[in-house]
Structure formats: C-alpha cells, structure tokens
Image (spheres, grey):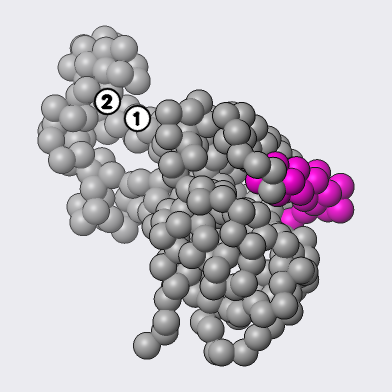
Amino acid sequence: MERILRVHNVNDYARYIGAPELHPLVSVIHYDELEHCRHSLNNYDVYAMFIGDEELEDLSYGQLQYDLHRHALMCVAPGQIGGKTDTGEEIHTKGWALLFDTDLLRGTELGRRMGDYTYFTYNVSEALLMNDEQRLSIVGLLEQIRQELRREEDAHTLRIVTSQVEQILELIARYYAQQLSTSARSTNSDLLSRFEHLLHDYYANGLQHKFGLPTVRFCAQQLFLSPNYFGDLIRELTGDSATSYIRRFLMQRAQQFLISGATITETSEQLGFEYPQHFTRQFKKYFGMTPSEYIYSRPQKIP
C-alpha cells in the first residue's frame, strides 16, 4: 500500500522534505537549496503551486501518471492528491513551491475570489508551460514572499504576503489565458466541431435516457480534458461558457421537436429532462416564452 503524506498544514510538507518552516500559514520552498529532499505522495488540505526547473518522470495526480516538463507550473487545491511515492531515497531536484493555508484567505477579497482561479483543478496534462520571462516574474514574487516571511512578523506581514500571493495567482491566470488562446487557435482548433459531434452522438445513442441531460463534466471527460480547462477553452473560442453552449444546443433541438409536432412532454423526455416543468422553465428562460406559447405563435398549417 502506498504511503500518503497528509499535508494538513504547510509545514507538514516543509518538515518532511527538510525545508525551513517560515510561517504557520505560508511556505515558500526552493528545492535547489535542500540537502535531504525526498519524494512524497501528498494528500493536500492546503493550496499549493509547484514549478519544476527540471523534467520529472512518473509522478501521480489522482489516478493518473504523468511527467512534469521543465519550467512547468501546476497548482493543487485542498482535497487533491499528487506527487510521487517515497522510496526512501534522497533526491536532488530543482524548482520552487508555494503552499498556503485556507486560513490565510479567511475574510479577504482573495478568499472570495479563489473560485475564479479555475486552474487549481486542471489536470496535470494541462499544466502551465512557462517561458523564461514568465518564470522569472513568478519566482521574483516567491523570493519577495520568502524575504517578508523571514522578517519579524508585525501587523502588516500577512496583508503583504496575501497581496503577493494574489499577484502570483493573477500572473498565472494571465499566462494561462495566453496558453489557452494559443491552444484554441492550434491543437484545439477543432474542439467546437468535436464538442458538437459529441452532443449529437449523445442523443443518437440514447444516453439521455440513461444519464439525463449532457453535462460539461461528461463532455470534458469524453474529450480527455478536465472540466475547468475544457470550459475555459470553450469560453476562449466562443466568448461564452460550455454550459451555455450545451443549453443552446438543447433549446435548438427542442424547437425542432416542437415544430415537428411533438408534445411538450415528449420533447422533455427526448431531451432528457427529469420533469416537463423543468423543461418548460428552461425554454421560457431561453426564448422568453413557454413551449405552449411558442407552439401557438407558429403559423398553423392549412389542411
């Protein structure tokens, strides 16, 4: 059975790899400086960000195995598992880590906005691949945080550190937006086409009768992407959310059923709604009229 290190607080990890313990809520680690570092498979109760300055192989993220490329950055959120099983061997690796406790965010604007940083739930295959300039920008802030934590703590310390953490998260968001834009234009240029075909196949195979309405999570899994990365790519391509794209597909399909003479109940069932009332509410929200009003607003055929 694999041994898993429970990172309940930031210093659980720092202590395990022999890094300095700078503060109970924040840890900045420069792996290059460590003499007795070891691999560990971690179960996180904290937020963490890792920069690999060399290629690492056979790491774990949930049930997945992956290699981390040089200058790749990945983030993990509380409740996630990642790392590499400890073999007892001491290692020498290069890179940086930032870990911060949820208590650092309590009552702050950053805490209220953490949900905006969707990259904390990206798959490792969707890691941020930084150039030298991007890496230097983030490492510079990590060094500033470390310098601040080495001072004698006063009333300003945590506010300054929280601000610096926020700057890092904003930079990561900017760099990911650039990466997403590039991906959307190149390797994922056919993503919308595959998304559309996936939705058509969903109904062609009758999956709505088994699973109900298609979801962003289902579509992302079928396209081998994490839900948030998939959603961010769709927003980059269309300017709208993946949820809205699915809703538009459903409502256009609903129109076709109603025009062809299907009843409201039949249309609701064919789309995969649990109850006709749910379908009616969604239809009215989208078109501004109920399905019944839509049917009677259509020109009637003359026998």
In front of the other: 116 or 157: 157
Amino acid at dot 1: Met
Q: Is residue 172 something one can see in this rendering?
A: no
Query: Label 1 near label 2: C-beta < 8 Å?
Result: yes
Q: Can you tell which of label 2 and label 1 is closer to the viewer?
A: 2
Magenta part of the protein: which range? 129-149
Circle number at residue 282: 2
Circle number at residue 251: 1
At x 43%, y 42%, the residue is 103
Q: Main secondary structure of the magenta part?
A: helix
Relative side of 196 to 191, left or right? left
At x 57%, y 29%, the residue is 155
Amino acid at dot 2: Gln
Confirm whether the magenta stretch covers residue 130.
yes
**Sequence-earlier tag: 2 or 1:** 1
| Mark-to-mark CA distance, 2 and 1 | 8 Å
In front of the other: 248 or 257: 248
In front of the other: 205 or 262: 205
Pinpoint residue 154: horizontal percent, then vertical percent.
Answer: 60, 33
- Quick one: which residue is furthest to the front in this view? 152
At x 50%, y 26%, the residue is 109
**Label 1 environment density (alpha carbons within 10 Å; few <14, some 14–19, many ≥20):** some
At x 67%, y 60%, the residue is 29
On screen, residue 148 above or below 79:
above
